[in-house]
Image (cartoon, rainbow, N blue to C red):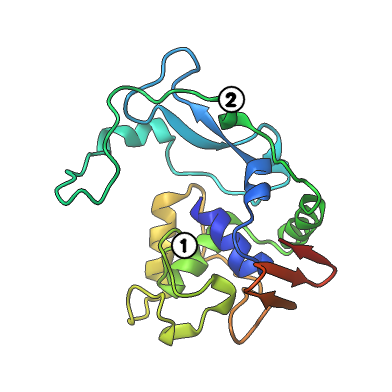
Amino acid sequence: MSIFVHLCEAFLGIEPHFELFCYLFHLKPQPDSFVLDVVGGAGLQLRQWKDREYISYKLSNKVIEWKPKWFFIENRLGSFPSITLGAPIQWPEWNKKPVNESQIPQLLEQIAVLRQNMLTGEAIMFDWMKRRIQPLQARESPGFQYEGTTDPSRYSKEEISDDIAFSRVQRLLRNVKKIPVVPGAFSVVNPPKQVLDKSSRCVEIEYFTLV
């Protein structure tokens, strides 16, 4: 999910697009639809054949191999929702397709261009690690407004070397042999061709509009 969010913000120049996410991913019961595990009983997964349209990457391990490392956090202050006992309940919405697909073809065209320019999952991950941000964390501004080392969304003011960022990418993804080349990520100094209307939550990007 972090790769998707940073792809949208730093390379498509938009806020995370929910309909595109629903087009590419679905919630899959684990290990199967008949018996769901209490811990890790559902996981996000690319829909069948969508890897042909999405950015390529391979996780270092299967999700099921991460389960022994998962743990619960005690809800001391009541700030988290109450834990529901038992396995998750599967709903038809887990596999629901996008309600409005009108903008998806244009976005897929942009992703295809990025793929041709050699943008990969490891390059996206490398970029956000160098920026010292967490894509899924609440931040001051989206990736296409990133301000560099002074950006308030950074969790550390210190910069890290390419080698350290590369080693972290290697721990998460498979077959990463060299430091990725990051093609033209958006930021304050390299803004996308768009006008953001915050009052209407509408973004105009070159030839089409995202609402």
Mark 1 packing: few (<14 Cα in 10 Å), some, or many (20+)?
A: many
Query: Disc 2 versus disc 1: distance between alpha carbons?
Result: 28 Å
Q: Are marks 2 and 1 in contact (CB under 8 Å)?
A: no
The C terminus, quarter of image: bottom right
Graded by Cα atoms within 10 Å as few (under 14), some (14 to 19) or many (20 or more), the crowding at tag 2 reads: few
Q: In x, y percent, where is residue 42?
A: 44, 30
Residue 92 is labelled as 2
Quadrant of residue 83 within the rendered picture: top left
- Counting from the top left corner in percent of width and height, residue 78 is at 20, 48
Image-based side of 154 in relation to 91, left or right: left
Disc number at residue 38? Answer: none
- The residue beneath circle 1 is 135
Q: In this view, does 47 lie above or below 29?
A: below
**Callout in the foreground (2, 1):** 2
Identify which residue, 211 or 9, lies in the foreground.
Answer: 211
User: Looking at the picture, how far across and down is residue 122, in whole percent?
Assistant: 53, 58
Kindly give the residue lying farthest to the front in the view shown.
Answer: 199
- For residue 211, above or below residue 36: below
Q: Nearer the viewer, residue 173 or 191?
A: 191
Amino acid type for the residue under numbered disc 2: Pro
- At a point 61% along the width and 30% down the height, the residue shown is 95
Instruction: Kindly identify the residue that appears in the image at 32 percent across and 24 percent down.
Output: 38
Location of residue 26 with respect to 109 vertically, above or below: above
Q: Residue furthest top?
A: 34
In the displayed orientation, state which residue is furthest to the right: 207
For label 1, the SS is: loop
> What amino acid is labelled 1 in the image?
Pro
Q: Which of marks 2 and 1 is nearer the N terminus?
A: 2
Identify the residue at image location x=44%, y=24%.
Answer: 30
Q: Where is residue 51 drawn, in percent x and y? A: 67, 41
